[in-house]
Amino acid sequence: MSVGTEKVDNVAGDDPHLKKEFGTVGLLFTAIGSIIGSGWLFSSLHASSLAGPAAILSWIVGTIMFLFIGLSYAELGVMMPRSGGVARYPHYAWGSFASYSFGWITWLACASVAAVEVSAVLTYAASYVHWLMNPNGTLKPAGLVVAILMLGLFVLINFLGVKWFARINNVLVWWKLIMIVLVIAAIMIAAFHMDNFSATVKDGSGFAPNGIKGAMEAIPAAGIAFSFLGWRQGIELAGETDNPKKNVPLTLIGSILICGVLYILLQIAFIGALDPSALAENGWSGVGNAIEVGTDAGNFSPLAAMATFLGMGWLAGLLYADAFISPGDTGLIYTSVTARMSYAMGRNRNAPAGLAKVNNNGVPWVSLILAWVAGCIFFLPFPSWQSLVSIVTSLTVLSFGSGSIALLTFRKQLPDMERPYRAKAPWVVGPLALLATNLIMYWAGWDQVWKMMAAVAIGYIFLGIFQVMDKGRAPKLEFKYGWWVLVWFAGILLVSYLGSYSGSDDKEAGQADVYGFNGGIVANIILTVIVLALAWYCQLPGKRVEEILNETEEIIDEDADKLAPEG
């Protein structure tokens, strides 16, 4: 028995009321716009602080890792273009329990990103609007009001529908691309000291003052991985593009490569522009103080401070303006994606049906309101942007891992299903993508991993409540096919605890340090093999996958009154 793509496109979880109005440029620019958010404004500073000149290596490795992760989704995104696809592919491969697990993780990560981006806007603004933030980086009451209103604006724009969202985003992305190229060129022309790449400073010397360990730690801790997370929009919005066969692979691969090259060049420009004497005095750990201009601006608005330090006040002004535009655009995008994630869970029946309700513009409006409420919660007094970014990164990267395995299981479960784009060497791409996922979480450190898993545990409490309260609609968990997820999560905890990355300022906190850098890589390879084997063993039978893909025709009819646009 095979699944025809025409039938699946109509009924396999893709709401017919969602409108396919993302073209080639629209989808690509949505991913690029999501990638170029607050990360590029802060990560060059934080990466230099953790890794010195080896931060360049951090960006290169990060780019390669996300290329493998993105490639593992290219086939899935074209084969089954579904809005909220990251949460839906596990549903087809392993049933409801696995689907809920990854859906909850993904929704939680997405919901927090918009708040992180608003926080970045206000952090830059606090350099000259002092009533926004406290000295410790938390919001003052007036700043909290501004943050809530900004998030509300994101929701309002999304209410207008995909077409208006794409038009606004395309304009903003052109601005962001021009700005980052302008900053790279201007800084390199103004000052470039080759000796900085092998400098001897008070806390280290050479290209990698903190070794390869420090360079890899910077990938999650400095916001490098966070800066790439937006590639996922090619998957999350795949159900709303007019030509998924062409647009999805182009978006996934193109957005990562374009942004990766820009980030690497920006890091080179940043290190080369540092004043050698100030760098020697402050060291890499205090690199923000090396570009201080009268205040602590070097630590809170590093690129603008760098431009001012180099005598380019005009560029500093543009950067302060961009500190609103770049994170703001990314926050706008993630508000949309967060709504699509809860929408997908509603379509999978892992969450209340109301979350999949759409308005006349084809927008899941109940999910949008939930995204706004959840985002507001993240405005509570959390730690610095950098600390919050680490746990958001870990949650998001964890959600990506299932796609690399589903790429392989679908080859067995759905061998006859049409694949307009067919990934080459899937048994190379899939395992390397999963290994990259595990390593990024491992390098984030124990302090971030245990918090991430605590958030996952809270999600299972909500699952239990939903199962009890909505027995008539909630699907069978099919735990016999999804239990491997718990083994993976436990393995992540164990490998992290036994490793040498703390993920906190207290370098001795929370981890046993049983194995060094090389041992950590070996441990994650072993974990990757175990997870792949268990997930392969637990996959749903092909016949059951076909039933899930086709049974949703009845679900659409059953939920029609709840999910159809109003008016």
Image (cartoon, helix red, strand yellow):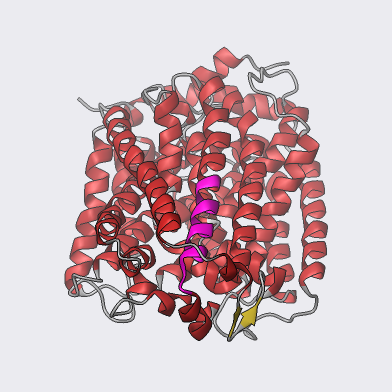
On screen, residue 554 above or below 74: above
Along the line of sight, the residue nearer the viewer: 398 or 4: 398
> Could one spot residue 352 in this view of the protein?
no
Majority secondary structure of magenta residues: helix
Q: What residue do we see at 25% from left, 62% from top?
A: 313
Residue 151 percent across, percent down from the top left:
26, 53
Q: In which quarter of the image is the N terminus?
A: top right
Residue 106 percent across, percent down from the top left:
51, 50
Residue 129 percent across, percent down from the top left:
18, 70
Along the line of sight, the residue nearer the viewer: 177 or 492: 177
On screen, residue 33 above or below 306: above
Residue 517: image quadrant is bottom right
Q: Is residue 402 magenta?
A: no
Q: Does the magenta stretch include residue 272?
A: yes
Left or right: 178 as drawn, with respect to 410:
left
Residue 537: image quadrant is top right
Number of marks in the rendered image: 0
> Could one spot residue 525 in this view of the protein?
yes
On screen, residue 323 above or below 276: above
Left or right: 316 as drawn, with respect to 450:
left
Left or right: 304 as drawn, with respect to 260:
left
Residue 152 percent across, percent down from the top left:
23, 51
On screen, residue 45 above or below 18: below
Q: Quadrant of the C terminus?
A: top left
Q: What residue do we see at 44% from left, 52% from top?
A: 184
- The segment highlighted magenta reads 261-275
Residue 26: image quadrant is top left
